[in-house]
Amino acid sequence: MKKLFLILICLSIGTLIFAQSAEKVDEILESKNLTRGQACYLVGTAIGEVKEADSYQTAFDKFKGLKMFENKKHDEPIRFDEFSNLALQYSSIKHGLWYSIAKNPHYAFRQLKIMKMIPQKTVPSSNITPFTAINLLAKIMPKADR
């Protein structure tokens, strides 16, 4: 069972690495917590809005217009619910009713939790690790963009 889990995780990471610079992904994976800039870089390169060579600041600037990023900095850790919202907005997943109406972190997190993409005991305000973020992105990003 552990081998199967490890293989699935490696495949998930491998699919995203195709879209991002391996050097940047290694740098991101070495971080303890994912920052807002790194999150924007991962999502942005997955959807083609950010170039592989762009900085985390540049990637963050592309998504700076989102309400949840008002008065925030690119180098601050991103919360699990904020990352869920960022990823879900650009995913291939059909959005639930409440998320479609509000498009906020609470409903994004809740939808992914209901879909069992996020473990039930996860706290929305906790910081997300890079490994967890990449694994989640591999599950929900559009397959055509990879």
Image: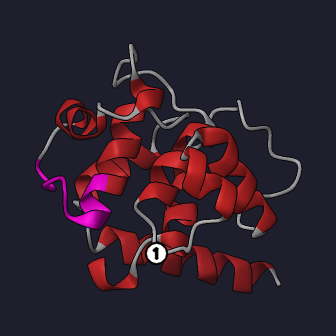
- Residue at (46% x, 48% y) in the render: 86
Does 108 sit above or below residue 126? Answer: below
Q: In this rendered view, identify the residue nearer to me: 10 or 12.
A: 12
**Neighbour class for label 1 at 10 Å: few (<14), some, many (≥20)?**
some
Does 104 sit above or below residue 69? Answer: below
Q: In this rendered view, identify the residue nearer to me: 113 or 38.
A: 113
Q: Residue 45 in the image: x percent, y percent?
A: 25, 59
Q: Is residue 50 magenta?
A: yes
Q: Is residue 17 magenta?
A: no
Range drawn in magenta = 44-53
Q: Residue 80 in the image: x percent, y percent?
A: 63, 40
- Give the residue number, with chain letter if any, for mark 1: 92
Q: In this rendered view, identify the residue nearer to me: 4 or 67.
A: 67
Does 66 sit above or below residue 72? Answer: below
Q: Residue 16 in the image: x percent, y percent?
A: 37, 70
Does 130 sit above or below residue 49? Answer: above
- Residue at (41% x, 44% y) in the render: 39
Using the rendered image of the protein, determine whether residue 132 is visible from the camera's viewpoint.
Answer: no
Q: In this rendered view, identify the residue nearer to me: 89 or 24.
A: 89
- Residue at (21% x, 40% y) in the render: 62
| In this picture, residue 65 sits left or right of residue 100 | left
Identify the main secondary structure in magenta.
loop
Using the rendered image of the protein, determine whether residue 136 is visible from the camera's viewpoint.
Answer: yes
- Residue at (18% x, 52% y) in the render: 50
Q: Secondary structure at mark 1?
A: loop
Q: Quadrant of residue 1?
A: bottom right
Of all residues, the one furthest to the top in this rendering is 71
